[in-house]
Image (cartoon, coloured by chain):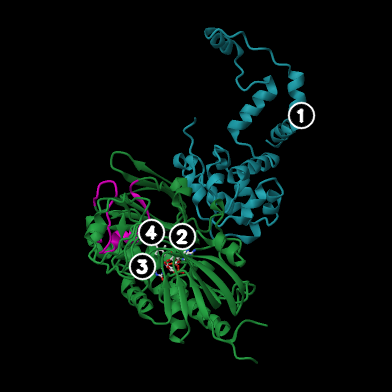
Chain colours: A green, B cyan
Amino acid sequence: MMEKTQNGVLIIGGGIAGIQASLDLAEQGLKVYLVEKSPSIGGVMAQLDKTFPTLDCSACILTPKMVEVKLSENIELLTYSEVEEVSGKAGDFKVKILKKPRYVNEEVCTGCDICSQRCPIEAPNEFDLGLQPRKAIYLPFPQAVPNTYTIDKNYCIECGLCKGVCRVGAIDYDQQPTILEIEVGSIIIATGFEIFDANLKEEYGYHLDNVITGLELERLINASGPTGGHVIRLSDGNLPKRVAFLQCVGSRDEKVGNLYCSRVCCMYAIKQAVLIKEHEEDTDITIYNMDIRAFGKGFEEFYQRAMSEEFGTKFVRGRVGELFEIPETGNIRIRAENTDTGEFTEEEFDLVVLSVGLIPCKDAKALQELLGIQQDEDGFFTGENPELLSTKSSVEGIFIAGVVEGPKDIPDSVAQAGGAAIKASVVAVKGGET
Amino acid sequence: MTEEKVKPFKVEEPLRIARLDPTFKGEIMEEPNAELIKYCFQCGTCTGSCIATRFENNFNPRRIIKAALLGLKELVLSSDVLWICTLCYQCSERCPQGVKISEFMEVLRHLAVKYGYIHPSLRLQAEAILRSGRVYEDEDTANVMREDVSLPPALSVDMDEVSKILNRTGISNILLREEGDR
Ligand SMILES: Cc1cc2nc3c(=O)[nH]c(=O)nc-3n(C[C@H](O)[C@H](O)[C@H](O)COP(=O)(O)OP(=O)(O)OC[C@H]3O[C@@H](n4cnc5c(N)ncnc54)[C@H](O)[C@@H]3O)c2cc1C
């Protein structure tokens, strides 16, 4: 056999799965290109407050890994970038990557924040799900990697204030998109997920002020979030005394075309119930559910703890029929059957949290077309033998990791990323099948 | 409406398996749209959405489906609660398993009639139609009311035609049979 020059690995998506795969491959000494479309790596895990069932601080686990990516000599981090074209085959992929203009020179920006302080324009903050504004020149969140600002041209008025105050001359309004061409031996897709659009379940009233999603709650309860860690009602800023969680919003629901279980919502709702109790002890919490799926290590114990006297979370077995707002108070009344007793119930709450499910990432279709890999009927990526090789896509040399393969939690995403990294390294080192 | 209480609809426990009719579910599922009840996973969305339940707690669509699937034929078909459903389709609209619950309730009503269980209030109406072709039989009062709003007197009913239709539907036989039974 002829000696082949060793190729690197392309990783698309810089959530926890893509980050872990990058670190594992870099540690093996392989060259890694990590392409992330948003201005920072981190994905959804960066938005979470604590993780179930241990209540570890999400950012405390994630941030060191993000920094490690930035510092690794083997990883070329390409944020605000997208894969444009892929050709070739396993062992020999040719890839075109589009680097979108940030209008800030990545090489010189020090992340000092002076530009953002001067910027007069406010825009919705994606990271905080619009719960507070950011500037038109911004860092998505304080721990962002890279620590480089980005100008949002949808809002920027080119007033020149940021350019005037930048001490290192990093602002460049005329920056152009650039194309980078690379060759890699294998590819890992780790583009993650979106949350289910709660507006599609009209009867659950997401348009109402005091009905929010689980991800919004993660931001509200986070000490560095828009309210400094206070879970408030969006209608009046008061602390809710009675909170309801509605499970399976967009999951296990034929009506919205998602028959699958999203696997994390039971546990994240329980986690959030416990966290709310830890913040405000005298809150009454009810979780309306069809059943609680506490299948992972330590999950059942966590569930029991949430039910115990310590936290006193009430679990009602019954999927909510509908809810409505009481206009005078902004309170929400929930109609549901308690199927354990057969009673029809109508209860009043101050705040309602919709435990929205996970759906395929926005770009799933585009990536499917770009790479020719197979999607399952729900739109997640899959290979020929998912039961044995969940990391393998239907195309030789292309692997999948994290929620892009199907709903899963952080530990499972990390485990799968490790598996995908090994598989990808074999192809990168030995070349594809000949 | 009468003040009479609706009999509670409850699956008695312990269940006596010998009293269950395993063919009942098959009989229901042969009817159009009712075959979907086998997908019911008892989440309670139907009951939680139901306007009728709000006023009559004994009407619980989830329980009726459960009883039907278990084969509690007599309990289901003889129950008053079958006739409480307003057929508003809210449950069918929201069921996460796509069960057509309103349609299923209609199927149960057809089966109930087939097996001779008709709610007394509906039997009175059916008998009136059989007798006079009208639900509201007091023609004179009706005509006074019509005159008040400048409507011509009601047309007379051709009972031959009405009988023909009713015979075709089979309702006359069912009502007669019921009378014989009593
Ligand atoms: C409300 C909520 C609470 C949760 N709580 C917990 C918890 O407590 N514990 C737990 O274990 N799990 C929890 N989860 C699940 C957890 O968020 C996921 O398991 C985890 O984020 C999956 O990581 P990922 O890398 O697969 O995807 P993501 O985090 O979605 O990362 C994907 C990345 O890919 C990028 N990307 C997307 N498309 C492209 C593209 N075309 N090109 C380049 N980049 C792209 C995205 O910008 C993103 O950075 C929770 C989820 C939710 C919604």
Say yes or no: labels 4 and 3 on the same chain: yes
Q: How far apart in space, not on screen, are marks 2 and 4 (Cα)? A: 13 Å
Q: Which image quadrant for residue A219?
A: bottom left
Which residue is disc 4 drawn over? A214
Q: Is mark 4 within 8 Å of ligand 1?
A: yes
**Which SS type dominates the magenta stretch?**
loop
Determine which residue is flagged by label 3: A46
Whether callout 2 and callout 4 share a subunit is answered yes
Measured from the top left, where is residue B21 in percent x and y? 67, 55
Q: Residue at x 38, y 60 (%)?
A: A175
Query: What residue span does the magenta drawing correspond to?
Result: A209-238
Do discs 1 and 3 share a chain? Answer: no
| Residue closest to the eye, B21 or B84 | B84
Separation (CA) of disc 1 from disc 3:
72 Å
- What residue type is disc 2 on? Glu
**Label 4: element kind:** helix
The location of residue A46, given as percent across then percent down, is 36, 67
**A384 inside magenta stretch:** no
Query: In the image, what residue type sits under mark 4?
Result: Gly
